[in-house]
Amino acid sequence: MRDVVLVHGAWHGAWSWRRVLPLLWAEGARAVTVSLSGVGERPGVTGVTLQTHVDDVVAVVRAEECRGAVLVAHSYAGVSVTAAADVLGDAVGPLVYVDAVLPEPGECWSSLSPPDTKAERRAQIAADGVLPAPPATVFGLTGDDAAWVDRRQTTHPGGVYDDPVHFDAARWSARPRTYVSCTAPPLASIDPSRARVAGQPGWSMVELATGHDPMISAPGELAAVLLDVARS
């Protein structure tokens, strides 16, 4: 079975995979998480750029001495994981995008934001240097799950928002790729990425009837998808 490397999205941390990890371990998968700089468990890191987050992912994969690992990106991490995979070569194999941003070479996270969202986020970054976390209800979470996430979310470093991503599209498209689309409710800001997946060959598409944070709201279903890929 392949190793599984889990990379959290914006405002989150490695903590967000807490419910998925034991399900992967129980089936014999060696699963590890990445803690991105300036967010989650590492809020004090300053001067963070997209390259910082790419380096975070690369460092964990290399430290774990992975070969052909499944690299999993949630949400914003689609940008950093796409670039990291290009650097890592055969240390990683299949890519899994969990309701994630799907960039093209030279684009930024901001490239896939609606104009009003882009303007609001740039104003926040100009004022404070960071992006404040939205309430967890935005991700389709309710009750105790929403409260749990709200307690743990942090601001996200603004330096990553307009940084372009660089990768070789031919190498990227040669990798096995799975997109996990979360549909109940769908997060509108991910719609452009979903549309790209629908228009590109080579994807395995999986729909989960849950919100944008399936590692929290549907950990069993998400773990089953990841295990299928890890066994490939």
Image (cartoon, helix red, strand yellow):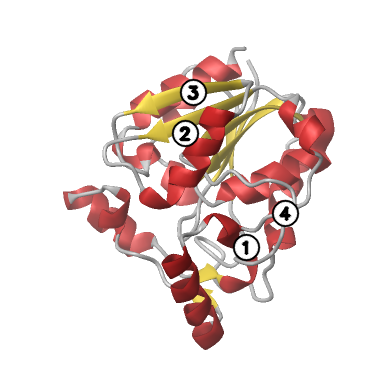
- Residue 181 lies in quadrant: top left
**Of 88 and 60, which appears nearest the observer?**
88
**Mark found first going from the N terminus, 4 or 1:** 1
Q: Are there few (<14), some (14-19), or many (20+) residues within 10 Å of tag 4?
A: many
**Mark found first going from the N terminus, 3 or 2:** 2
- The residues bearing labels 3 and 2 have C-alpha atoms spaced at a distance of 22 Å
| Disc 3 residue type (three-letter) | Met
| Disc 1 residue type (three-letter) | Ser
Point out the image quarter for the C terminus: top right
Mark in the foreground, 3 or 2: 3
- The residues bearing labels 3 and 4 have C-alpha atoms spaced at a distance of 23 Å
**Mark found first going from the N terminus, 3 or 4:** 4
Pointer 3 with pointer 2, Cβ within 8 A: no
- The residues bearing labels 2 and 1 have C-alpha atoms spaced at a distance of 21 Å
Point out the image quarter for the N terminus: top right
The residue depicted at 36 percent of the width and 32 percent of the height is: 219
The residue depicted at 74 percent of the width and 60 percent of the height is: 51
Per the image, the residue denoted by label 2 is 21
Per the image, the residue denoted by label 1 is 37
Pointer 4 with pointer 2, Cβ within 8 A: no
Q: Secondary structure at mark 2?
A: helix
| Disc 4 residue type (three-letter) | Val
Q: Secondary structure at mark 1?
A: loop
- The residues bearing labels 4 and 1 have C-alpha atoms spaced at a distance of 17 Å
Per the image, the residue denoted by label 4 is 165
